[in-house]
Amino acid sequence: MTTDTRPSIFKRLGLPDTSLAQDAYAHVERLTPTFLLHHSVRSYVFARAHAQNKGLRAGTDYDDELLFLSCVLHDIGLSEEGNGDHRFEVDGADAAAAFLREHGVEERRIAIAWDAIALHTSDGIAERKGTEVALAQAGIGTDILGVQRESLPSGLADDVHALLPRQDLGYALSDAILTQARTKPQKASPMTFPGDLLRRHLPYGAYPGWYDLLAAAGWGDKPVGATARRRAETPQQVATLFMEYLEAGDVEGLVSLYEPNAHFVPAPGTHLEGTDAIRAAMQQMVDSGARLKLELRDIRQVDDVALVSNHATLTGAGPEPVISTTTEILRRQPDGGWVHVVDDPFFI
C-alpha cells in the first residue's frame, strides 16, 4: 500500500491549498520521475521566496496559484505523455495548457502559464513577460543553476532539500533532455539550449553551430570585422599562422591563436595564463624583432583535440638562437578553427 505524502508536503511547504493545485501535483507525480517532481515543487518555493524578497504580495501583486501551476507543470514536456515534436519547453507548455483547459481554467490564465513554461529557459525574455512568468523562471533558475540562491532566506534551501531531495537533478534533467533529443533531433534545433546540450554529446561536426548555419545559408556571406581574421583549418596550420603573424607584427593575430584561458610558456620556468598575459608576451616578442621557424615533428589528433610537437628555432629575441621542441595542445573551436590550449616550447 502506497502512502499519499501530498497532504504533508502541501502543509509543510505552505503550497496553495486548492483542489486545482492538488490535481496538478498529482498529475505531475503520475507523469514524471521523482527528481522532476521535486524540482518542480522546489522551483515554486524558491520563486515565492524571490517574490517576498521583492516585496510582492500573493493575491495582490501576483497570482500565487498560477505561479504554483506554472512551476509544478513546467517540465511535463519531458514525460512520455508530453513528448511531442517541439522543444521540451514548448511541448510542456502545450501539455500544461491542455491540462488546465480540462480543469476549466480561464484562457487568460492559461496563456500566462503557457508563457511561463515555454520561456523558462529563455533568459532576457521571460523576465519581460509578466510577474508570474518572471518569478517562475527565477525559481527554476535557482533550483537548476543556483541563480540568486544567495538571496534566499537562511535555511530555506536546506529545509526544502531535506523534504524534497535533489537526486542529482542537473545531470538527471540533462539526461532526460538528451534521451528525447537523440530520438527526435527536431526537439533540439541548433542555437537552442537543448541543441547546445545535444551537440556536446555528438562527434565534432555532427551537429551544426552558428557558423555552420551561416555557411549553409546559400547567400555567400563572407566574414568581416572581428570574424575576418584567418583561422587555422587544421592543427598544422596554427604554426603557419603563428609564423606569419609574428613576422607581420600582428599581436592580436597571435593572441587569436589561443583560447582565453590558455597556458603559454615563453621561457623556461615562466608560465603565463590567459589572454592579457599572453598578449603582453606576444607584444614583447614583436617589439624584440623575433622570428620563429616551426617544423612539424609529430601530431596526434582525436576528434577536436590535437597534441602537436614542432621543432622550433627562435631568432632575434636574444644574441643566440633558441632551439627547442614544442609540446602543444590544440582544440577545435565552434567556428571550426584550431587554437592553443597549452603552448610549451620547453616541456620536458
Image: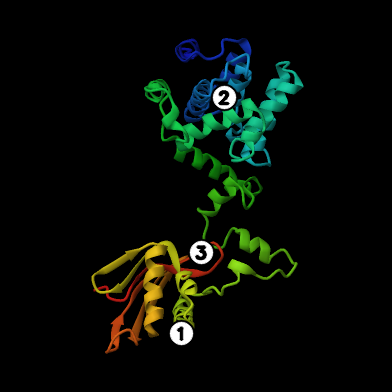
- Nearer to us of marks 1 and 2 is 1
On the picture, is 178 further left or further right than 159? right
Rendered image quadrant of residue 101: top right
Give the residue type that dot 3 points to. Answer: Gln
Foreground: 119 or 135?
Answer: 135
**Residue at image location 64% in from the left, 39% down from the top:** 125
Instruction: Determine if residue 45 is in view.
Output: yes
Residue nearer the viewer, 218 or 242: 242
Q: Distance between the residues labelled 3 and 2?
A: 38 Å
Q: Which circle marks residue 247 in the picture?
A: 1
Any mark on residue 72, and which?
2
* Residue 23 shown left or right of residue 159 in the figure: right
Mark 2 surroundings within 10 Å by alpha-carbon count, few (fewer than 14), some (14 through 19), many (20 or more): many
Q: Can residue 308 be seen in this view?
A: no
Above or below, comparing residue 263 to residue 7 in the picture: below
User: How many residues crowd mark 1 within 10 Å: few (<14), some (14–19), many (20+)?
Assistant: some
Q: How crowded is mark 3: few (under 14 residues within 10 Å), some or many (20 or more)?
A: some
Q: Position of residue 117 (x, y in %)?
A: 63, 32
Left or right, 232 with respect to 185, comes to: left
Q: Distance between the residues labelled 1 and 2?
A: 61 Å
| Residue depth check, mark 3 versus mark 2: number of the one nearer the observer | 3
Mark 2 belongs to which amino acid?
Answer: Val
| Amino acid type at image mark 1 | Glu
Quadrant assignment, res 21? top right
Element under label 1? Answer: helix
Labels 3 and 2: the sequence-earlier one: 2
Task: Give SS at disc 3.
Answer: loop
Q: Considering only vertical position in the picture, is 175 above or below 159?
A: below
Q: Which of marks 1 and 2 is nearer the N terminus?
A: 2
